[in-house]
Image (tube, helix red, strand yellow):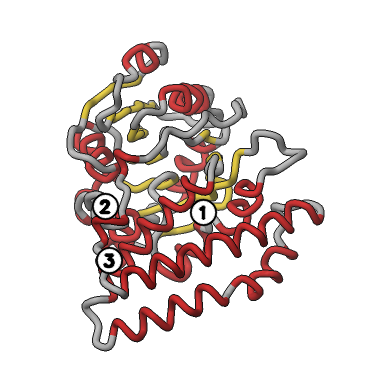
Amino acid sequence: MISVIIPHLNQPEALRFCLRSLCGQEGVRQPVEFIVVDNGSKAKPTAICSSFPAVRLLSQPIPGPGPARNLGASYANGEILAFIDADCIADANWLGEIERRFLQDPQIAVLGGDVRIAYQDPCRLTLLEAYESVFAYRMKEYIARQGFTGTGNLAVRREVFLAVGPFGGIEIAEDRDWGQRALGQGYRTHYCPNMIVYHPARRTFGDLARKWRRHTIHDFARIQSKSGWRLRWVLRSVAVALSPPAELVRIASSERLKGWRPRALAFLGVVLIRFYRSGIMLALAAGVRASELNGGWNLAAPSAPPRDRS
C-alpha cells in the first residue's frame, strides 16, 4: 500500500484540486490511502475530505508542516509514504512512477521528483510565475548538491522514514534537515524526473518575501555556530545583492520560459528578491531579532487554487 500524506492549512479549494488529481491517478496497481492532516485551519476541510474515497482527516495542533506530516506518517498503513502539499496538483502518473521506481530497484530508499509551476494563464505569465519557473523548486539541483528534496514531492520507504526519524518543527527548514539526516545515515535521495507535481507560483511579492525571510533566518541560525560568522554573513549579503547579472545565462537558456517577455520578468524578479534578501541579511547582522522578522507556517496567507490539470 502507498500512503499519501497531505498537510493542510486554510487552503480548502486548493486541497479539493489536489485530492481530485490524486484520485484520478493512472498506472498504480497497489492500494492507496490518503491522509490529510489539518494544522489549525479556521475551518477543518471535513466536507471536502469526505467527498473523496479513501481519505482520512486528522488534526495536528502543533504548528508547522513537519509535525503535520509526522502525525500523518504515524497513522499510515502503507509500506511507501508519499508526501505532497495541499496546494499542489499531482501529475496523472505521479503515484504510478513512485510505485514503479521502488519496485524496479529495491535499493532505492528515498525519491524526490520534479516540481513545476502551475500557470493561471500559460500564454501570459506573471512576474512571479516567470521568476519561480526558473528559480523555485530546483529539486534536481538540491538533491545533487545538498542531498535533500522538498517535502512537497517526496516518497520514502516506511522503514527508512522510521530509521531517519520525524521531520523537524517550524523553527528549521524541515525538508533540508530530514534529507541531510537521511543522507548521513546512508540513505541517498534519488531524483525522479517523471515524478511530477505542479505548484502555483506565489500570488504576491509578499508571499515570496515570506518564504525567503524564513529561509534566510534558518541559514542565519546555522552560520552562527561557525568562527568569524558575522564577517562571512555580511560578505554573503553583499554578494547576494550583486548576483542578479550572473543569472542572465540561466534565464536565457531555461527551457521553461518561451519568448523575451517572461525572461525579462524573471530577471526583474531576481533583482527584486535578491535585494530584499540582502536587506534581511544585513538586518540580522546588525542585531535585529529573528523573531521580529519571521512569519511562520500558521501566518501564511492562503494561496489561490491552481488550475485543475486533471
Local packing at callout 3 (Cα closer than 10 Å; few below 14, some 14-19, many 20+) is: few
The answer to which of marks 2 and 3 sits earlier in the sequence is 2
Instruction: Work out whether 271 lies above or below 230.
Output: above
Label 1, secondary structure: give it: loop
Instruction: Name which residue type carries label 1.
Output: Tyr
Local packing at callout 1 (Cα closer than 10 Å; few below 14, some 14-19, many 20+) is: many
Q: Relative to 259, is 30 on the left or the right?
A: left
Label 2, secondary structure: give it: helix
Quarter of the image where one finds residue 281: bottom left
In this view, the residue in front, 14 or 179, is 14
Q: Residue at x 36, y 84 (%)?
A: 232
In this view, the residue in front, 290 or 161, is 290
| The N terminus: image quadrant | top left
Q: Residue at x 61, y 57 (%)?
A: 269
Image mark count: 3
Estimate the spatial distance between the alpha carbons at disc 1 and disc 3, rounded to whole Å.
29 Å
Residue 113 point in image, percent of width and height: 50, 50
Residue 65 point in image, percent of width and height: 30, 42
The residue under label 3 is 288
| The C terminus: image quadrant | top right
Instruction: Name which residue type carries label 2.
Output: Val
The answer to which of marks 2 and 1 sits earlier in the sequence is 1
Instruction: Name which residue type carries label 3.
Output: Val
Residue 40 point in image, percent of width and height: 25, 30
The residue under label 2 is 160
Estimate the spatial distance between the alpha carbons at disc 2 and disc 1, rounded to whole Å.
24 Å
Q: Residue at x 57, y 77 (%)?
A: 242
Q: Which of the two discs, 2 and 3, sits closer to the camera?
A: 3
Badge number at residue 137: 1
